[in-house]
């Protein structure tokens, strides 16, 4: 059986086998929240132009539906963590951020209250600081910017737009800036540690010094289980969920199932 990413079954899988999960939320036409990574469905229909009921009929789960699943309280009692990424609207290939920030956050906070989930089990992340602005001033939740900023609404511009920012702004700069802006931590592209871009940024021992010096949390998707093991102090967002369960040891950062199953889903044997 194949479990798909950002589905209730897929996210339950991630919570069952890892320290937590990452999932994505988007705003619907009637200003509710659904779990979906891309701004459009595979059919080409735009998430923001469909209502919650229309999307549910197409198999897209709502955030409330997931958080009120009967299995969730058991995971929360075990200290599992949900990293929830706030996604922008997309209009003509460009992200709409500040205009929807308060709408997304107020709906999100209401759903958390409805589902009776403790904010301590929730971490909120986004590529867009505009979407995190309401989170930062509400001390119930923890906010984490993802760096470098990329335009997710236009796939052709993701790499051309992101790579100059990796070269221009060091990880150390991002960390110190995050402290000044009251973020709990920073999540960053693996290029900060790997490949030619790692020459521009701190080595792992220096990153650990940054964590100890600032008290801030750092995380990234390192791309392989072997690399995850080499960077234990980081929160490690894993797409390799085929080798499970996998949990952090004491003193390590969390091991997070990206979208619950990795980005492409996972084949499992039915019990």
Image: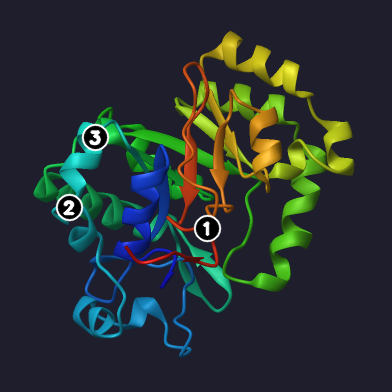
229 relative position to 58: left or right: right
Q: Where is residue 127 in the image (x, y as percent from the top left)?
A: 54, 50
Which residue is tagged 2? 111
Residue that mark 3 sits on: 119
- Along the viewing direction, whichever of 259 and 87 lies nearer the viewer: 259
- The structure residue drawn at horizontal position 20% and vertical position 47%, both measured from the top left corner, is 72
Q: Earlier in the sequence, mark 3 or mark 2?
A: 2
C-alpha gap between disc 1 and disc 3: 24 Å
Colour scheme employed for the rendering of this structure: rainbow
Classed neighbour count for the residue bearing mark 3: other residues with Cα under 10 Å, few (<14), some (14–19), many (≥20):
some
Q: Can residue 85 be seen in this view?
A: no
The label nearer to you, 1 versus 3, is 1
Q: In this view, does 216 lie above or below 262?
A: above
Give the mark nearer the N terminus: 1 vs 2. Answer: 2
Q: Where is residue 55 in the image (x, y as percent from the top left)?
A: 28, 80
Q: In x, y percent, where is residue 201? A: 80, 30
Q: What element carries label 2?
A: helix
Asked if marks 1 and 2 touch (Cβ < 8 Å), the reply is no
């Amino acid at each position: 059986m194949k479990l798909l990413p950002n589905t209730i079954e897929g996210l339950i899988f991630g919570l069952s086998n890892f320290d937590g999960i990452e999932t994505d939320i988007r705003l619907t036409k009637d200003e509710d929240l659904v779990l979906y990574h891309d701004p459009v469905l595979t059919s080409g229909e735009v998430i923001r132009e469909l209502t919650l009921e229309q999307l549910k009929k197409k198999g897209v789960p709502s955030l409330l539906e997931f958080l009120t699943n009967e299995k969730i309280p058991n995971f929360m009692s075990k200290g599992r963590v949900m990293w929830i990424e706030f996604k922008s609207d997309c209009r003509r290939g460009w992200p709409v951020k500040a205009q929807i920030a308060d709408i997304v956050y107020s709906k999100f906070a209401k759903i958390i209250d409805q589902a009776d989930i403790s904010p301590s089990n929730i971490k909120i992340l986004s590529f867009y600081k505009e979407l995190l602005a309401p989170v930062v001033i509400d001390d119930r939740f923890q906010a984490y910017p993802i760096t470098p900023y990329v335009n997710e609404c236009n796939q052709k511009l993701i790499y051309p737009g992101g790579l100059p920012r990796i070269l221009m702004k060091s990880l150390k700069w991002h960390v110190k800036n995050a402290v000044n802006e009251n973020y709990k931590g920073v999540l960053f592209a693996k290029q900060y540690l790997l490949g030619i871009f790692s020459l521009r940024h701190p080595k792992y021992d220096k990153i650990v010094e940054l964590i100890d010096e600032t008290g801030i949390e750092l995380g990234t998707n390192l791309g392989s289980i072997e690399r995850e093991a080499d960077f234990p102090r980081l929160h490690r967002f894993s797409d390799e969920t085929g080798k499970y369960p996998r949990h952090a040891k004491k003193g390590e950062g969390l091991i997070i199932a990206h979208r619950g199953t990795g980005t492409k889903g996972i084949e499992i044997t039915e019990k």
